[in-house]
Amino acid sequence: MKKIFIASDHAGYKLKNSIISKLKKIIDLGPKSTESVDYPDFAKKLSKKVASNKGSFGILICGSGMGMAIAANKTKNIRAALCYSAKNTKLSRLHNNANIITLGERLINKNKAISLIKIFLSTKFEGGRHLRRVKKI
């Protein structure tokens, strides 16, 4: 079974815990409270885990999801996608082989987040012409 890591900052803490309660067998990398933290620290921690565990996935949550995506994409072999709709989530996997989904707690609700994560985890990379492009990243 693929490893799935999750982390947030303080602005994504509540949604992170909701996701953990719905989707078992997720490895929580923190934080452990709503005390203010710096999102790049948690993005880096999770990204390194995903990069070093072949075939694993990550879930990162902050207020908008944008900061986590920017920070995570600094790590080699990470393709973090900010997801907000079923279509863009599916395409992030089909065409970009994204291995981390980033979400914004201030922009989507718990049910939408769970739905997007399920799409993300169940969609396979198409490969083909997309593989050539992903290799250029």
Image (spheres, rainbow, N blue to C red):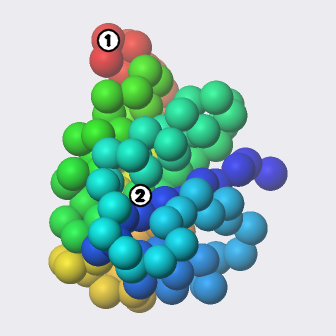
Q: How many marks?
A: 2
Asked whether 60 or 122 is in front, the reply is 60
Asked whether 129 or 67 is in front, the reply is 67
Image quadrant in which you'd find residue 73: top left
Asked whether 13 or 15 is in front, the reply is 13
Q: Are marks 2 and 1 in contact (CB under 8 Å)?
A: no
The residue depicted at 52 percent of the width and 51 percent of the height is: 58
| Residue type highlighted by circle 1 | Lys
| Residue type highlighted by circle 2 | Leu
Please state if 24 lies on the left or on the right of 42 as rendered: right
Q: Is mark 2 on a helix, strand or loop?
A: strand
The correct choice, above or below, for 78 with respect to 131 in the image is below
Asked whether 104 or 8 is in front, the reply is 8
Residue 62 place in picture, x, y as percent: 29, 65
Residue 88 place in picture, x, y as percent: 27, 56
The residue furthest front is 35
Please state if 106 lies on the left or on the right of 125 as rendered: left
Image quadrant in which you'd find residue 78: top left
Q: What element carries label 1?
A: loop
Residue 60 place in picture, x, y as percent: 41, 58
The residue depicted at 70 percent of the width and 50 percent of the height is: 3
The residue depicted at 73 percent of the width and 48 percent of the height is: 2
Badge 2: how crowded within 10 Å, few (<14), some, or many (20+)? Answer: many
Is residue 40 among what the camera can see?
yes
Image quadrant containing the C terminus = top left
The correct choice, above or below, for 14 with respect to 36 in the image is below
In the picture, the disc for residue 136 is 1
Residue 125 place in picture, x, y as percent: 50, 38
The residue beneath circle 2 is 60
The residue depicted at 50 percent of the width and 42 percent of the height is: 45
How far, Cα to Cα, is label 2 from label 1?
24 Å
Q: Which of marks 2 and 1 is nearer the N terminus?
A: 2
